[in-house]
Image: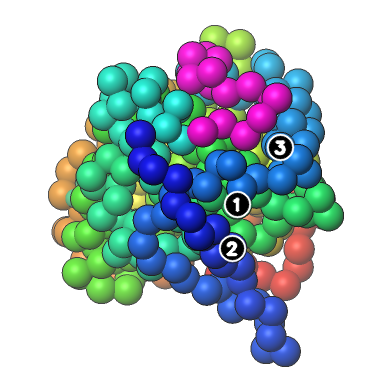
Amino acid sequence: MSAQAPVQPRRVENLHTDKGKVPVYATGVVDQHWEGYAAEDHATWATLFERQRKLLVGRACSAFLEAQDAMGMTPDRIPKYDDLNRVLEPATGWRLVGVEGLLPELDFFEHLANRRFPVTWWIRRPDQIDYIEEPDLFHDLFGHVPLLMDPVFADYMAAYGRGGVKAHAIGPDALQNLTRLYWYTVEFGLIREAGGLRIYGSGIVSSSGESVHALESPAPNRIGFDLERIMRTRYRIDTYQKTYFVIDDFEQLMAATAPDFTPIYARLAEQPSIPAGAVLGTDVVHQRGSGEGWAADGDV
Ligand code: PHE
Ligand code: CO
């Protein structure tokens, strides 16, 4: 148990300037400062938790739902990292650490490589219940942490961290390729289960709108996982995804990402990126999206 830090950590959010939003990075690990949460913070957690759990039964993959129960996450109050760590560490060696906001890329990778998952200590304000730009405690804890209980997914996340340290040393293009992989798996991945497609991506499970959209909307493409295809696919962070990629199981993800990416990065540097909504002749298409409601102003 860490002693309670006397000073409340900072709440680091994006800067809103007349040139648009600028992400602000914060390094360092902070105490969760659990005693400092207001009743309003616990109420926000409760509202979000109850709404998402109702939506996610039958939509999230079984590993996610079972792990959330096993960890003892409940709606009544924001969980304490120390309590979750007592379950998580013996299970897969992962440990939660508190952070103030977005981490610089290399810091983030080094945490993951060492099986430390950075969790934003603060939760969104009531006026941000339905949408917030930055990852907050609800996204990080409710969305990311449960699957760290799954042994295969836990290994994937640590391998991703080591891969990130490596890609960071290779250069910005390699890093962009790797970041797209994270985006389309860890954040927005779908998985095939006996009952049909299910969600495992944290960006989906922590969003009420996208939890329904990702599975039920006719608008997006749903395409079989393909490593190099994903690494070339652009995305945008401020709309629902135009394309979701589907894995068969976490073993497939682990096996596909096991090879050394260095020659893959070199090969991809010669190829153009793929727009977020494109469907290629080589794709295994579960569903071709109607494109309904897609933003017309492009993607990154
Ligand atoms: N195999 C990758 C590499 O050599 C590392 C990695 C593993 C990346 C798992 C992502 C996920 O860079
Ligand atoms: Co996230």
Q: Is residue 168 left or right of residue 236?
A: left
Residue 122: mark:
1
Q: Amino acid at mark 1?
A: Trp
Quadrant of the image occupied by residue 213: top right
Q: Counting other residues with Cα less than 10 Å from the Cα at mark 1, is it few (<14), some (14-19), or many (20 or more)?
A: many
The CA span between labels 3 and 1 is 11 Å
Q: Earlier in the sequence, mark 3 or mark 2?
A: 2
Tell me, yes or no, if residue 210 can be seen here: no
Write the residue at 31% across / 33% down: 94
Query: Which percent across, then down, holds residue 271?
Result: 35, 68
Give the dominant element type of the magenta stretch: helix, strand or loop.
loop
Q: Is mark 2 within 8 Å of ligand 2?
A: no
The image shows residue 20, relative to residue 127, as above or below, that is below
The image shows residue 15, relative to residue 256, as above or below, that is below
Query: Which percent across, then down, holds residue 291?
Result: 75, 51
Q: Is residue 73 magenta?
A: yes
Q: Is mark 3 within 8 Å of ligand 2?
A: no
Query: Which percent across, then down, holds residue 55?
Result: 75, 25
> In which quadrant is the N terminus drawn?
top left
Q: Nearer the viewer, residue 161 or 30?
A: 30
Residues marked 1 and 2 touching at CB (< 8 Å): yes
Magenta-highlighted residues: 66-80
Write the residue at 38% across / 29% down: 85
Q: Counting other residues with Cα less than 10 Å from the Cα at mark 2, is it few (<14), some (14-19), or many (20 or more)?
A: some
- Location of mark 3 (residue): 42
Q: Is residue 57 left or right of residue 33?
A: right
Residue 11: mark:
2
Indicate the secondary structure of the residue bearing disc 2.
loop
Q: Amino acid at mark 3?
A: His
Quadrant of the image occupied by residue 48: top right
